[in-house]
Every structure is written in C-alpha cells, then in structure tokens.
C-alpha cells in the first residue's frame, strides 16, 4: 500500500510539472503574440509605439539623438492583384528579413500593418547615418524578387520618410506624422527613394 501511494504521489508530481511547463510555454507564447506581428514575426504597432516612447524618454534624459523611418512598399497592390494574397504575404515576410538585414543590431524594426514598416534608429551621430541605411535598403530592392515559387516581374520598391529628433517633433505622434509626410513626398517624387522631413512639407 505504501509503495502504491509513493508511486501515485510521484505520478501526480510529474503531471503537475508537465502542466506547469505547458502553462509557462503558453504564457510565453501569448506574451510574444501580444508584441509581434503574426505574419512577419516583427514587432507590432503597439510595441513599436511603446519603444518609441522609451527612446524619447532616453534621449530627453541625455541620450543620443534618434530618427524614425516610415517605409511603404511601392506597387505592392499589383503583387496581390497579379499573384494573389498568398504571394503577397510571402513577399512581406521576405521584405521583413531583407530590411532587418540592412539595419544595425540595436535598431528597431516593426510592421505597422499592410505594407507599412517603421524603424527607430537610435544613437545617431549625424543625420547622414539615416540616409546611409535608407540607401542600403533601397539598393537591396534593386534585385529580382520572388514570392514563394513565383518570380515577380513587378519591380517592388520602397518609399522611405525620415524624421529626426528633436528637429521634426518632440513627441511620438509628431515624429510618426513627420515621417509619414516625408514618405508620401518620396512616393510623389517618383517612388523607390527617401526623403527627410522638412517644415515646408
């Protein structure tokens, strides 16, 4: 009888540990999903905005200047219309990896939704650092792309707007708006380029 109770107690403990492990894994997965975009695995809009507020607090406490980049893919709708939404989703995943590979280790990349991406560039020594990164991203788009098994004849570029702190705004909302306005200027100027925000815009 004692042996049976001991075996039962051991079994209950094992079940408890297994359940605890599953609960911890599920909790970690939910925490990840709350902060990340389901399609690309990048940070989502809510987490990006939180980190942007954190960057603002850091620079206001004496940290180095930073910038916000707003990226919008050019001709992405044509990919969806021509090749279908599955191909479009695959292209977005490829773009996420391509953008991440052109950023510095401490830069923050997020997908806002659709074909819109944003970046926080921290610890900037000069505005030219932003231009260098924007050019790297644009250069990487000048090669043939594919979506799954489909080769794309459509040239998919990106229009990039750049807003620097503190020149373009003192809060998250004004910086995002400035970067968005600059992105639309890049798009109207011929696409697949970048523009710094200026007050005239």
Image (tube, grey):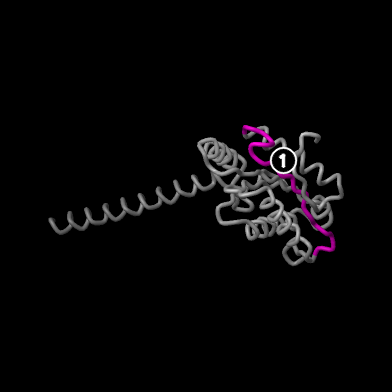
The kind of secondary structure the magenta stretch mainly shows is loop
User: Dot 1 surroundings within 10 Å: few (below 14), some, or many (20 or more)?
Assistant: many
54 is higher (above) or lower (below) than 191: above
**Image quadrant in which the N terminus is located:** bottom left
1 is higher (above) or lower (below) than 113: below
Q: Does 148 sit left or right of 23 as displayed? A: right
**Image quadrant in which the C terminus is located:** top right
Percent x, y of residue 130: 68, 50
Kind of element beneath mark 1: helix
Q: Does 24 sit left or right of 178 as displayed? A: left
Image quadrant of residue 84? bottom right
**Residue 160 counted in the magenta span:** yes
Residue at image location 59% in from the left, 53% down from the top: 41
For this rendering, which residue is in front, 21 or 176? 176
For this rendering, which residue is in front, 59 or 125? 125
For this rendering, which residue is in front, 181 or 31? 181
**Residue 126 counted in the magenta span:** no
Image quadrant of residue 188? top right
Name the outermost residue toward the left: 2
Percent x, y of residue 29: 49, 49
Name the outermost residue toward the front: 126
Residue at image location 75% in from the left, 53% down from the top: 85
Q: Which residue is mark 1?
A: 179
Magenta segment: 152-171
Q: How many marks?
A: 1
Percent x, y of residue 75: 82, 52
Residue at image location 59% in from the left, 51% down from the top: 107
Residue at image location 77% in from the left, 34% down from the top: 199
């Amino acid at each position: 009888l004692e042996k049976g109770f001991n075996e039962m107690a051991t079994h209950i403990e094992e079940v408890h540990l297994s359940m605890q492990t599953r609960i911890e894994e599920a909790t970690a997965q939910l925490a990840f999903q709350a902060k990340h975009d389901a399609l690309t695995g990048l940070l989502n809009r809510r987490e990006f905005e939180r980190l942007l507020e954190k960057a603002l607090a850091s620079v206001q406490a004496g940290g180095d200047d930073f910038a916000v980049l707003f990226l919008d893919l050019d001709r992405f709708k044509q990919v969806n219309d021509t090749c279908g939404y599955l191909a479009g989703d695959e292209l977005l995943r490829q773009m996420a990896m391509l953008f991440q590979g052109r950023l510095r280790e401490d830069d923050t990349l997020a997908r806002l939704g659709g074909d819109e991406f944003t970046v926080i560039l921290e610890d900037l020594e000069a505005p030219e650092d932003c231009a260098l990164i924007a050019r790297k991203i644009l250069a990487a788009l000048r090669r043939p792309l594919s979506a799954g098994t489909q080769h794309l004849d459509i040239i998919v570029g990106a229009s990039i707007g750049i807003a620097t702190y503190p020149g373009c705004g003192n809060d998250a909302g004004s910086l995002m708006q400035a970067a968005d306005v600059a992105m639309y200027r890049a798009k109207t100027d011929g696409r697949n380029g970048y523009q710094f925000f200026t007050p005239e815009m």
